[in-house]
Amino acid sequence: MIIVSNGFDALEVSLDGGKPDSELPAYNFDISPDGRLAAFTTFLSSDPKKKLALVPVDSPQNTKLLDLQRPIPTARAVRFTHDGKAVVYPVRDQDVDNLWLQPLDGSSGKQITNFKSEQIRDFHWSFDGSKLGLVRGHTDSDVVLLQESRP
């Protein structure tokens, strides 16, 4: 069994090919450092809150769904920490994103960045887990009212 992504969903597919065995709406999933778990956020039809899905790659029927400690912006990445004991994801407060570290053992998480502006588009850890690279930015928009003038 492998887990593949079509860009929006995580799909469980036999190594021999064929149709997916299951489908969970997933966005920007990550594989744990030991290769045993896939992590992503998902919705359940019975619950409007996003959940953190932890899917064992060798036994997806044992998927765990955890509450996110902080709300996550739509379609944002979830990344495992280098030791695989936590996940990190962006949280938004007043249009500013920062990273939140949520331990998988259920203990309290913590904010690990303290930006005062911009949004986090993507982020990745270095191979040794000692550095964090981020893509940050903002969206500019203007509103223009067009009105027909009277002759």
Image: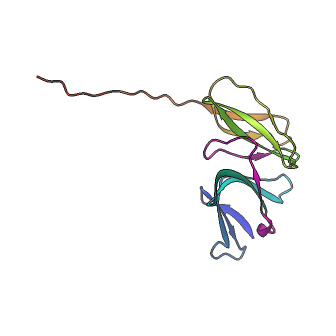
> Looking at the image, which residue is at 87% across and 44% down?
107
> Looking at the image, which residue is at 85% across and 40% down?
108
Whether 77 is among the magenta residues is: yes
Residue 104 located left or right of residue 15: right
Q: How many marks?
A: 0
**126, 39: nearer the viewer:** 39
Q: Which residues are magenta?
A: 58-80
Q: Position of residue 97 (x, y in %)?
A: 66, 32
From the image, give the main secondary structure of the stretch colored magenta.
Answer: loop
> Looking at the image, which residue is at 71% across and 64% down?
3
Q: Is residue 35 above or below residue 95?
A: below
Q: Is residue 115 above or below residue 9?
A: above
Q: Is residue 44 above or below residue 82?
A: below
**Residue 87: quarter of image:** top right
> Looking at the image, which residue is at 24% across and 27% down?
147
Quadrant placement of the C terminus: top left
Q: Position of residue 127 (x, y in %)?
A: 82, 43
Q: Position of residue 133 (x, y in %)?
A: 73, 35
